[in-house]
Amino acid sequence: MKGKILKISRFCTDDGPGIRTTVFLKGCPLRCIWCHNPESQNPDEEYYSNGEKIGKTVSAGEVVDEIIRDRAFYETSGGGVTISGGEPLFQADFTAEILRLCHENGIHTAIETSGFASLIEFEKVVKYCDMVLFDIKETDEERHRKLTGVSREPIFKNLTHLEKIGKPYILRAPIILGINDRYEHFEKLRALKSSGEFCKGVEIMPYHILGAYKYELLQRDYKCKNIKEPDKTQIDKWRILSGEYL
């Protein structure tokens, strides 16, 4: 089985427990206005304005061969593989096959996902996940549509499904100054954490401008180019409000 990836990053420590290999897939149905990986949105191979190619087609086996190289680091650190994106559910069959093969090789598996997919596609993938890093972009429906281009309804249905099947997950919340740093949003994140039996915590993902240059290379307008990065005091406040420290 083949799919399209952006890159494979080794020795990652921010995409789940332990030392991990993160596989970034191509293609995403969301259009978050702050996206720092805009090159991952288009499911097709494309080129930056400087001629650099974005994305390549590979087999699930080729990806797993790369992942297995660092098995010793996973075993000593409690790490494994994380499929990210783009959106791993956008290539559900490909993602599921990678995770299945990793399970056969005794490797801990996780995905980082927006949760936006049909339940059928979601079930295909989470069947082979040991953990889910579940992004919550917004908790208000109207704001979610405005900021991401899609409804939050299928996302929250899939979040409920994780509780139903008893799958461990972590809520990840990208927070952007003046966009979704609302007290009501933090309250709802805190409530989701408190009510989730299998929720292992909340992680605030503060806005950064590291991906801004990619919009220029893609010749696209970046809607968040005038937004400032939060300072440490602001980030600590967000973490307290969301319940991350509890």
Image: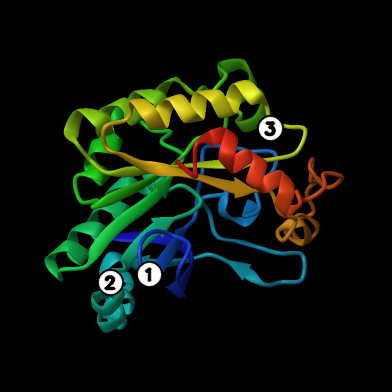
Residue 89, numbered circle? none
Q: Is residue 38 above or below residue 32?
A: below
Which of the two marks, 2 or 1, is nearer to us in this view?
A: 1
Give the residue at mark 3: 181
* Viewer can see residue 178: yes
Sequence-wise first label, 2 or 1: 1
User: Residue 11: image x %, image y %?
Assistant: 43, 76
- Residue at screen point 26% across, 28% down: 161
44 vs 134, nearest the viewer: 134
Q: Residue furthest left?
A: 104
Q: Of helix, strand and loop, which one carries label 2?
A: helix
Residue 1: x and y, percent? 26, 60
- From the top left corner, tell me how far across and down residue 51 is, in percent: 72, 71
Mark 1 lies on residue? 20
- Return the disc, 3 or 2, that comes first in the chain's sequence: 2
Proximity of marks 2 and 1: CB atoms separated by less than 8 Å: no
Residue 201 quadrant: top left
Classify 10 Å Cα crowding around label 3: few (below 14), some (14-19), many (20 and above): some
Q: What amino acid type should be assigned to the residue bearing mark 1?
A: Arg
Q: Secondary structure at mark 1?
A: strand
